[in-house]
């Protein structure tokens, strides 16, 4: 079953081993697995990838190594490469998050990720209120003000970049390395929501105010208010996207 059509221009001079070709094949196969076009139990071969995408054996092998590191496939002697059961996938990997958000099952993924954010980010904000450095507190206040300015201007691309930095900084400054490790996943959620047109042209005032409230609470060391304000942000996300 074909998963994508990949042009041959990139590998015209290198036998199909360019980094861009590797990324294209990885995106095509990974997206097909995430979407269910290649369901668990499907078998893949290096030769099949070479023929389908017109790439070298090296590119095929490197693609499978990445997918295996994400627990999307496994290899067995005399069996080949097999798509792994979903329950074993590394669901926190940012690439897999992006692929799942780009699939027909994106509503389920948005719901799961929003629930995860509700479980983690309020506690991270409380941690930031207790442990963030003076520079981090000041930066959050600045970023919240930038979100207000960019949001009211309808500059969604610039707004997205600042929003990613804001939520990443909360996770980085909370003092919990396990929460910090989720920043790539959160960035993919925020990016996908914007790229898929799921953000209003101008963010709601309630969301902008909640970001300002988070920043102000962290700045003054108010852990309870920081936690509450992040709940307001995520409640607004859930309601705006019709998630339950």
Image (cartoon, helix red, strand yellow):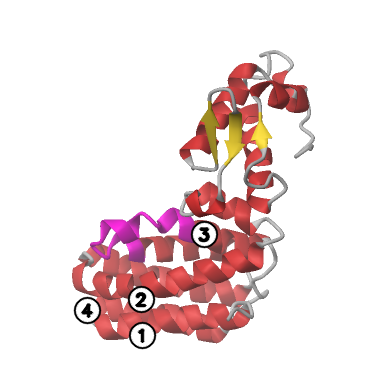
Residue 94 lies left or right of residue 20; in this view the side is: left
| C-alpha separation, residue under disc 1 versus residue under disc 3 | 24 Å
- Discs 2/4, front: 2
Residue nearest the observer in this picture, 64 or 156: 64
How many neighbours does mark 4 have within 10 angstroms: few (below 14), some (14-19), or many (20 or more)? some
Query: What residue is shown with label 3?
Result: 161
Residue 144 drawn above or below residue 16 = below
Report the disc number at residue 228: 1
Q: Identify the residue at image location x=61%, y=55%.
A: 100
Task: Mark 3 and mark 2 in contact? Answer it, CB < 8 Å.
Answer: no
Q: Is the magenta stretch mostly helix, strand or loop?
A: helix
- Discs 1/4, front: 1
- Discs 3/2, front: 2
Q: What element carries label 1?
A: helix
Query: What residue is shown with label 4?
Result: 221
Q: Which of marks 1 and 3 is nearer the N terminus?
A: 3
Part of the protein shown in magenta = 170-186
- Discs 1/3, front: 1
Residue 118 percent location from the top left of the image: 43, 75
| C-alpha separation, residue under disc 4 versus residue under disc 3 | 25 Å
Q: Is mark 2 on a helix, strand or loop?
A: helix
Query: What residue is shown with label 2?
Result: 122
| Magenta region includes residue 90 | no
Residue 145 percent location from the top left of the image: 44, 74
Can you say which quadrant of the picture contains the N terminus? top right
Q: Which of marks 2 and 4 is nearer the N terminus?
A: 2
């Amino acid at each position: 079953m074909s998963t994508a059509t990949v042009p041959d221009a990139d590998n015209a001079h290198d036998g199909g081993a360019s980094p861009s070709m590797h990324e294209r094949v990885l995106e095509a196969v990974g997206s097909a697995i995430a979407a269910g076009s290649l369901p668990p139990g499907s078998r893949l071969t290096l030769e099949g990838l070479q023929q389908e995408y017109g790439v070298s054996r090296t590119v095929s092998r490197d693609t499978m190594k990445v997918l295996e590191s994400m627990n999307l496939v496994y290899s067995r002697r005399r069996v080949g490469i097999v798509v792994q059961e979903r329950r074993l996938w590394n669901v926190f990997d940012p690439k897999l998050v992006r692929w799942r958000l780009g699939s027909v099952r994106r509503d389920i993924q948005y719901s799961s990720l929003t629930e995860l954010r509700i479980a983690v980010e309020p506690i991270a904000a409380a941690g930031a209120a207790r442990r963030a450095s003076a520079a981090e507190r000041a930066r959050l206040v600045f970023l919240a003000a930038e979100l207000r300015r960019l949001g009211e201007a309808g500059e969604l691309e610039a707004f997205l970049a600042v929003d990613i930095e804001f939520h990443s900084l909360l996770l980085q400054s909370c003092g919990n390395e396990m929460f910090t490790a989720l920043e790539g996943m959160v960035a993919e959620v925020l990016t996908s929501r914007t790229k898929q047109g799921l953000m209003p042209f101008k963010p709601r005032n309630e969301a902008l105010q909640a970001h300002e409230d988070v920043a102000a609470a962290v700045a003054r060391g108010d852990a309870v208010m920081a936690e509450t304000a992040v709940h307001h942000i995520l409640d607004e996300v859930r309601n705006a996207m019709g998630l339950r």
